[in-house]
Image: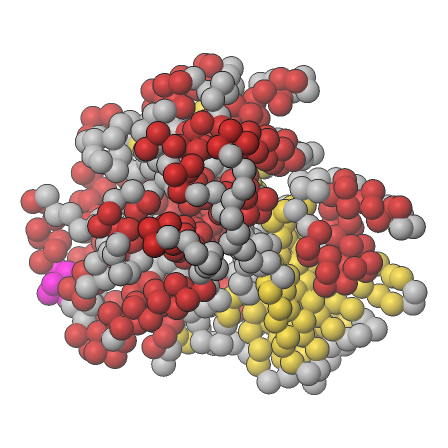
Amino acid sequence: MCGITGWVDWEQDLARERDVLAAMTKTLAARGPDAAGMYIRNHVAFGHRRLSVVDPANGAQPMTRKRGGNTYVITYNGELYNTLELRCELESRGYGFTTNCDTEVLLTAYMEWGPGCVEKLNGIFAFGVWDEKEQQLFLARDRIGVKPLFYSERAKSFLFGSEIKALLANPLLKPEVDAEGLAEVLLIGPARTPGHGVFKGIKELKPGYCMRYDRNGIHIQRYWSLESRPHTDDFDTTVRTVRELLEDTVKRQLVADVPVCTFLSGGLDSSALTAMAANEYRSNGLHPLHTYSVDYLDNDKYFQASSFQPNDDAPWVVRMAEKFETDHRRVLLDTPELAGSLSAATVARDLPGMADVDTSLYLFCREIKKGATVALSGECADEVFGGYPWFRREDMIQADTFPWSMKPEIRLEWLSPSVTANLKPLQYVAERYHEALQEVPRLPGEEPYAARMREIFYLSLTRWMPTLLDRKDRMSMAFGLEVRVPYCDHRIVEYVWNVPWEFKNHQNREKGLLRQSLTGLLPDDILWRKKSPYPKTHNPSYLQAVKQQVLAILDTSSAELRYLVNEQTVRNMVQQADNGFHMPWFGQLMSGPQLFAYLIQLDAWLKEYKVSLV
């Protein structure tokens, strides 16, 4: 994993702009702590920060190769999991290689197949290739959007980068946010509409898309999308196929020349990956596998079961670690760090995020990095296999809005009247929701309930899941930790997309198909344990900490947050918070305390980025 950035300008000699490129590249230093590199020629400038995972001694970037008198240059962030197969195919076509890294394979693949190379890739990636002869930049992003990529076009200039901060380091761009960008933050946030960069003039290259930039401008092309077709496999074949795909994916994603570990929560998703990884390690004589879990000080004292979070994870983590003989470490977090890291997590994400759901991962990854460089995470199994409440609760299934934010009108309570008048919140959310539904690839003749479930899965995969992938990427890469997400392998996503709901809902259980496919791998009590989401703190001291921070902001006359929120309403909410205040306004884990934390992050974002509302 790495950080990439670049600049093409048809009117300037970028050789004179080395300092600007260096500043853009420096913003990504945390993503690539091992090395830095730049390539500058006349109208093109590439920057790169490297995190060495495969072939650390080689593979420096930007990487340059020549063929037939032409020069190709790549800056690349990601991992290819089919490097060996691609390399063998390219060798059969006469190419030779000087490194063992996937960067050289990817650049060679582009030299051989051009833009069509992306269809051959299995991995997570965002990369740019400069073709000197054609005077053309090619950009591509992986199918699911695990790796980020943002860009901006300014007259005869074009900028791109792994993170928004890299673009904002160029004086061509200012940290301006217009009404639509503000609506994304206040009404859709912490989610984000695909393709939206929030800041004025900044866009995101969507997952499954590639683009070409030349003297004629931008040309964007979609190279991958979900396709709906009848599922012809019977249930037993489907179960077997899911197991085979997942085992193959885990085996591929364990490849690295640096220490690898797994996240282990004791839930189904991480336990399955841990079991497969531990078995693979044992068979290769690499035992033991290192595993990590996160918990919170005094959670055992304050934890209260709910329909969303039915039991504590800690005992199940111990059960798994003992069963598979892993070298396990428990990371314990406390309130002061959780509340004190909200600003740092905002900067890591470039936007207000998922409050303590972000900061806990941020601090967790900081500790993991001390012992590992690569981790496997169970993220996204819920979106692919149907694990969330909105796959099962009829009120959420039938809601005419995003099911994780069923009551968008809640936000009207704490937004200022001037903001609501300007942004038209309910209209904006409704437009974004129906825009998403129009994208759903339909299956002709599908009965209404099945068609609705297809919509729910599409919304989850394309609107909810990117929020978690953004979180995972930014919080981990803030410490140079590469987190891989096997459940996002595009082969798994493609296959399970067309599996009928009655298969996915086997035994009327969330992720029933996945559970059945893992039979014999996991102990039955873990295999059929009721889903418990990512853990959060239940310590009342966290609520007190974020309340105090919010009040301190509101007491600061220069705080721009005061102009975005209804100050008296927020103060009243703070006062009521000790009386069981509960406002589930985004997902399962973001309620009253997280709303206050989100406002803290919003204020930090406005200050840290010197945001101008235009």
Residue 571 higher or lower than 313, as above or below: below
Question: Percent x, y for residue 351?
Answer: 40, 61
Residue 483 higher or lower than 12, as above or below: above
Residue 531 higher or lower than 95, as above or below: above
Q: Quadrant of residue 227?
A: bottom right
Residue 261 or residue 173, whichever sits in front: 261
Residue 444 visible somewhere in the drawing:
yes
Q: Quadrant of residue 67?
A: bottom right
Residue 166 visible somewhere in the drawing:
no
Horizontally, residue 67 falls left or right of residue 609, namely right
The residue at 51%/70% (across/down) is 203
Question: Percent x, y for residue 199?
Answer: 44, 71
Give the main secondary structure, helix, strand or loop, of the magenta stretch.
helix
Question: What sort of colour scheme is used for the picture?
Answer: secondary structure
Q: Quadrant of residue 538?
A: top left
Residue 250: in magenta span: no
Residue 19 or residue 234, whichever sits in front: 234
The residue at 26%/27% (across/down) is 311
Residue 327 higher or lower than 27, as above or below: above
The residue at 15%/64% (across/down) is 413
In the image, which residues are magenta? 567-571
Horizontally, residue 547 falls left or right of residue 309, namely left
Q: How many numbered tags mark residues here?
A: 0
Q: Quadrant of the C terminus?
A: bottom left
Question: Percent x, y for residue 467?
Answer: 41, 53
The residue at 65%/80% (across/down) is 217
